[in-house]
Amino acid sequence: MTTHPEHEQLSAYADGELGATERVAVEAHLAACGKAREMLAAIRATLADFAALDEVEMDPQVGFAIRSALARERKLSSRTRRYAWAGGAAAAALVGILSFAILGGGPNPARDASGAGLGGGPQLMAMEDLDEDSALRVLETYVQENYAFPGARGDMGGDDAAAETAVLTHAPPAPEIQAYSAADATTFADCIRTIERESDSARLVRSIAATYKGEPVYVLIFEIPAERPDRVEMWITARDSCETRYFSQANVNR
Amino acid sequence: MIEERTDHELIAAHLGGDRHAFDRIVERYEKRVWAVCLRMCGDPDDARDAAQDTFVTAFRSIGSFRGDAQLSTWLHRIAVNASLDVLRKRGRNKSQPVEDVPEIASDEAGPEEQAVRASRAAAVHAALTRLSEEHRTVIVLHDLQGLQYPEVAEALDVPVGTVKSRLHRARTEMARLLGHLKDDGTEGPASPSNVSRNRR
């Protein structure tokens, strides 16, 4: 072989992508051409450097960001459909069905320290301004209150995988609902309805009026017994716009 | 719960109104999409935005997804475009000065192996940011993400021959940036194997 192989043939050769005839021709050329050997060595050294790259780790916050973006997208498309159908009449009807506990004014929506009506757990969270970590604890609290873990709590060392999945021990409680004010109720019902519309069996089981990073929000916990019995979802939506600020989910068994 | 449905079954379920089918697709591909975005963008914040945009775009347009294509290839294509869009918006899609590419240390350091590996990785990342969009894309898809030539061709909507030639040019450029190749096309002095020989 007296001519240089096409340059990309050296890369394809390094990848093992050449057919038998081309491979023999390239090898014959390599045997006779120092420059081609140097090029091949450089390509292989470069590929060896690529191999030194570790597998990319994904920060869990990226997953949250993706799901939050999708939740917003779903709401937008859901709203588009809803406005095309029937306007807000059904939402107004829903307000009549839901029983709201109307809170006093002011930015801190938490009830008194007894937590009456809040199920004895999340009220602690509602009294503080939530962030990602404390929001997750609200969800964990709900799961701990309503589900049992396969092993005794505090003895989770034997089977981590099993211990991480909660098992329902009783029917979820009736929805406990808070709203900031009566005037807020329509917006709030609209929010709930928007989320529930995305899943026929979605059922609101806990609602907390709170603040998230300083913004008034609703923390909404849903169960989806028919479609996703293995999941409890938590949506944090802005009080005024109903836009999703945070989304998370917990894996459970029934 | 392990999702056993195929990609195409999940897509059909999503289009049929199963709200959670798309969540399964996200769970299945988010790490790969993230890896593409991070390697294309080079910056975690940009990559997060690109990964979000990737799945939102996929959500909006999955109805037009062709049944004979691979979902993974389609998502790679969207992720590349989303990454390039983010970079253009940020005005960051410019080559860095060559001196920003760290030199690669010897791989014969024994106990310093991890440091050497980190040094190599930093050099590769820095060199990647200096490549043109076209070259960075083929390196990321083929050499880093492991797509085959026909898959890269499908993702970029170009012939396989174009992928081969782009890939070779991209690798040659990377080899120069990493010091494995001199500008005259001969093997460079900074090759790890050369350094190792010099130290013996």
Image: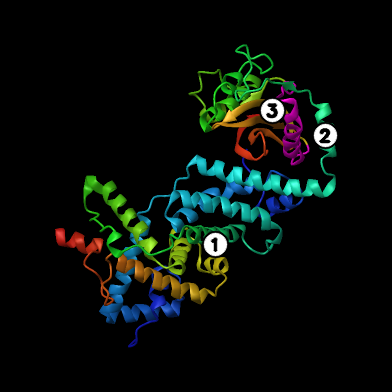
Are there few (<14), some (14-19), or many (20+) residues within 10 Å of tag 1? some
- Mark toward the viewer: 2 or 3: 2
The answer to whether marks 1 and 3 mark residues whose Cβ atoms lie closer than 8 Å is no
Are there few (<14), some (14-19), or many (20+) residues within 10 Å of tag 2? some
Q: Is residue B124 left or right of residue A188?
A: left
Question: Mark 1 belongs to which amino acid?
Answer: Asn
Vertical side of A36 occupied by A132: above or below: above
In the picture, the quarter occupied by the C terminus of chain A is top right
Give the residues drawn in magenta, as a range. A172-200
Numbered disc 1: what chain? B
Camera sees residue A149: no
- Mark toward the viewer: 1 or 3: 1
Q: To which quarter of the image does residue A99 belong? A: top right
For the image, the number of numbered tags is: 3
Query: Considering depth in this image, is A191 or B132 the residue closer to the camera?
Result: A191
Q: Residue at x 34, y 84 (%)?
A: A4
Q: CA distance from mark 2 to mark 3?
A: 34 Å
Q: Which residue was labeled with disc 2? A: A92
Residue A254: assigned label: 3
Q: Earlier in the sequence, mark 2 or mark 3?
A: 2
Q: Residue A194: give x, y in percent of width and height.
A: 74, 39
Q: Residue B7: give x, y in percent of width and height.
A: 65, 53
The secondary element bearing badge 2 is classed as helix
Q: Is residue A193 magenta?
A: yes
Q: Which residue was labeled with disc 1? A: B81
Q: Residue at x 51, y 28 (%)?
A: A160
Question: Mark 2 belongs to which amino acid?
Answer: Ala
Camera sees residue B34: yes
In the picture, the quarter occupied by the N terminus of chain A is bottom left
Vertical side of B173 occupied by B14: above or below: above
Query: Considering depth in this image, is B132 or A200 the residue closer to the camera?
Result: B132
The answer to whether marks 2 and 1 mark residues whose Cβ atoms lie closer than 8 Å is no
